[in-house]
Amino acid sequence: MIRPFTPRVERQFIGKYRPKVDGKEKASGKALYADDLSLKSRFPGLLYAKVYRSPLPHARIRSLDLSAARAYPGVVDILSYADPDVAALKRTNAGWTDGVDTVSYRKMMWGTFRDRLVLGDTAHWVGDEVGAAVVAESEFAAEEALRLIKVDWEVYPFVLDPYEAMKPGAPVIHPEITRDNIFPPDPFGGEEVFVDKGDVEAALAASEVTIECRSVYHNATQGSLDNWCCVVDWKPEELTVWSNSYAVDQTRMHVSQMLDLPLHRVRAISSYVGGQFGRGDTGDQPFFLFTALLSKRTGRPVKFRHTRRESFHDSRQPAVYTARVGAKRDGGIVAMHFTSVGNAGAYADHTMFALKYAPKEITEVALAHVPNVRFETRGVYTNKLPACMMRGVGNSQFNIIFGQVVDLLAERLGMDPVELAIRNFGHEWESLPDPSLARVLKEGAERIGWAEKRHKPGAGPLLAGTRRRGVGFSFHPAWHAEWQETRRGKVQVSITLNPDCTVLLNAPSVETGNGSNTCNVLGCAEALRFLGVGFEDIRWGSTVDTAIGLKDCVQTDSAVSYLQSEVMAVAAVELKEKLLEIVAPALGAAASELDIAGGEAFVKAEPSRRASVRELLLQGDLAPILVLKSRAPLATRTGVPFFANFAEVEVDEETGKVEALKLVVLNDCGTVMYASGAEAQQIGGQVIGLGETLTEEIVYDRATGVPLNFNWIDYRIPTMADMPEVEPVLLEVWKGAGEYGACGIGEGTVTCTPRAILNAVYNAIGARVDEIPATPEKILSALAAKASAARAAAAGATATAGAAGAAATAARAGAAGSEVAP
Amino acid sequence: MAEQARKDLAPAGQAAADPAPVGRIRFRVNGAEVEFGPESGLSPSTTLSYLLREKLGLTGLKVSCDEGACGACTVLRDGKAVLSCMSLAIEADGHDIQTIEGLAPDDPVVEAFAEQSEPGHGTALQCGFCTPGFVMTTKAFLDENPHPTLAEVKEALSGNICRCGSYQAIAQAVLHAAEKIERRRTSS
């Protein structure tokens, strides 16, 4: 049964179910993406660039022989690391910002980890873009020429596993940053122990109940269908870069700072982007720079794009978490100690955001009432694909241990995990229980049928001879409230009112699919409802171009859905003031005596004296009225709302296959800006979430370091046939600052899926798998461990009391699967 | 005619040069006849997706995986859905190709995808990159099975990937499209 969301405050436009503003354009195939906009027919003289990719995981180029490649028909030029233009480029990082603000080279967030060279001479993973880039008349010729490049390699030993990489004598991957592959402390992330509240060891020692567990998050990849693509045309007067970057102003800054061009000589343009999901971190990618240099050298526009294989270019940051948690018998948690080891892969980028910054924020907004908390982490370089943001940064990795702690501790205490969570977690501005968390979890429990379906682990009925069902959940604090967006700096919006009362809206933000464009049009219509402006009266543009002189609001944290609408609400007030001044003479009253409603201006004291604003404007000078507003996000500390996923699964104990039967996705939104879009994000996130949990995994050949499945046949993304019913639940309990007080939701909808499913699996079969993807092999080996522990326990029952105790311990360890730290 | 065109194909190019140009091929795209000869720079390995996008500017179809795994490049050949990245341009010779650009402005499938927004399922498209592929797969599917069940829809469209994950709404859009087609058929 579908239960539509009902808003807390009924509004005319905001919060509605309706089609997307770009629905027709996209459904008819007319929406143009970077690869469509950059056809040769649109760019006469277009050349194509391809970059050399290392076949080795760790090696240095001693020399390059480019002669055969240069001689290949169609090749126009080859740029290599030895060229002065390239050698002069500064060391960099692909995560200058966390995607919310525009950041200069000097102020880049992870300046401690400037570990990337543009076309460097050293390869750090198989696929690293190193050495040389070819530019040719056709992509085919460029690819063929790459094959003819002869490289004399100095081959270094490599390491893929972070624990191996930390051992003395391990290959050193970035000696310029660290001699032991472990990331040094940095000004933004802090020390290795980055949260240390109270006295964790003393509190654990004094706890009545303690648990220990471990969870492993692997390296899934974003999998945007729209592979990276850019065209750079470097003319003497201006460099223009068309791309599918989702951060246009930052792209301009990146190119400007790296190529030493003033900002007004760089123009960045993005159109529709076919899925972002955090790929490439904030897009400060070296390929923009060598493509630009090739354009400069040839004097022609140059296109560079990734193939699908090459778009396996970053992964979520894999992390191994352990937890030790102490509680009182009544369920009050007194101490939490988390450790993590993150596999950064070949380049640091946003690794420390995932490992330190996100958990630190979570401590503030979810663990505030736990008196003793300690977090420590190690980010480690290896020779794998670089780790990166992916629909969140660090949240999913923490949630997989957090949700395990809740489930495991509740089991030990004999409590309902829903009650345990509500009893303990919330932010520091609120007393417990946190109303948002309580509502989200209680609603989720009802929707999944928690009371009827939750049973003791593995104690449900056997279905079809081999299958058991279970339910589980996980929850998380949001990280997209307005106060959390203050680092973004000013959000800029312009509204131009035409004399016929139609509207040109400039709320620059690259449309990556998450629905914020529709939110913007709804927000504009809502703000201008005093003019009687409708959805169809507003022109929204799909192209974001730095030439218009406004900074785009970057699609991170899914916060654009409300940030620009908040600014529009303020802009509308100013627009009304301007209009009142304009129409005052015609109504023979002072502006202060007038108001406008329903498109008519009137004298407040004598409402029958009124006139249509449109008619008055059409009789005037016909100049459009422009309001431009720059407003920083409100910093008022409002706490955050919570979100959760509940899952019901069926596990086949014979084959080890896990099938998700139903997922319930719950978000407290503050205010739902656009109901259909929000539900699309809730449902849609489960494709990434379920894929990461069950099937998606990048597999390496350990002997060579070669990734084996950079394609969508062996890297298995769920299709329509793989997906269960997903029930989206939108709630409005918490409220932030501002007109709407909303909170982004889309990014986080994937966060709780893995742990919700793993907890449901445990509920189904009574054996824990705490490493994703939960493949049949892992399920079967957990079941085997459970069976052997049960046999040991049965044997122990006939032995001495002491031996029985030991067997019980073994049974717990076995039942807990891999929860014991290595 | 088509036979002759195939015989005219030049052999594969030599290793040190671009492959040799092909002989002539002729086919219909969205109702209009097109012809390509040696002057167009095509090779025997040129894919239909490349020809449609790069030579004819028909960018509704997308090339994402370029190896038949995602369905974004789906077009119709003689009314059947084919992956244009896995079809050679020469295989189009003598056939009728339809791309999303050839659909009527009020095409019921396009409308159903664009409008999908009722509570409980989200929208049938988000970033929109996979959408033309889904629309064309749906066109061919509903031609064969005008009154599908939800299970049949899920099976039929499981060759297309939507990373934004709009599957649930896409399935609804397909069912709505079937209703629209039926309504138009009975009212005309």
Image (cartoon, rainbow, N blue to C red):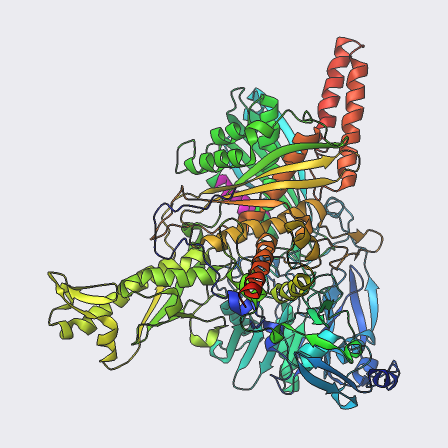
Residue at horizontal 71 percent and vertical 74 percent from the top: B49
* Above or below, comparing residue A468 to residue A53 in the picture: above
Confirm whether residue A373 shows in the render. yes
Q: Position of residue A128 (x, y in %)?
A: 73, 64
Q: Position of residue A414 (x, y in %)?
A: 58, 21
Q: Quadrant of residue A725?
A: top right
**Residue situated in front as seen by the camera: A10 or A644:** A10
Confirm whether residue A353 shows in the render. no
Q: Position of residue A115 (x, y in %)?
A: 65, 61
Q: Quadrant of residue A526?
A: bottom left
Quadrant for the C terminus of chain A, please: top right
Residue at horizontal 61 percent and vertical 57 percent from the top: A349
**Chain part drawn in magenta:** A355-364
Task: Work out which residue is located at the far bottom of the displayed protein and give it.
Answer: B39
Horizontal side of A197 relative to B53 (left or right) equals left
Q: Main secondary structure of the magenta part?
A: helix
**Residue situated in front as seen by the camera: B148 or A186:** B148
* Above or below, comparing residue A815 to residue A429 in the picture: above
Q: Quadrant of residue A582?
A: bottom left
* Above or below, comparing residue A651 to residue A22 in the picture: above
Q: Is residue A58 magenta?
A: no
Numbered circles on residues, count? 0
Q: Is residue A360 magenta?
A: yes
Q: Position of residue A652 (x, y in %)?
A: 75, 36
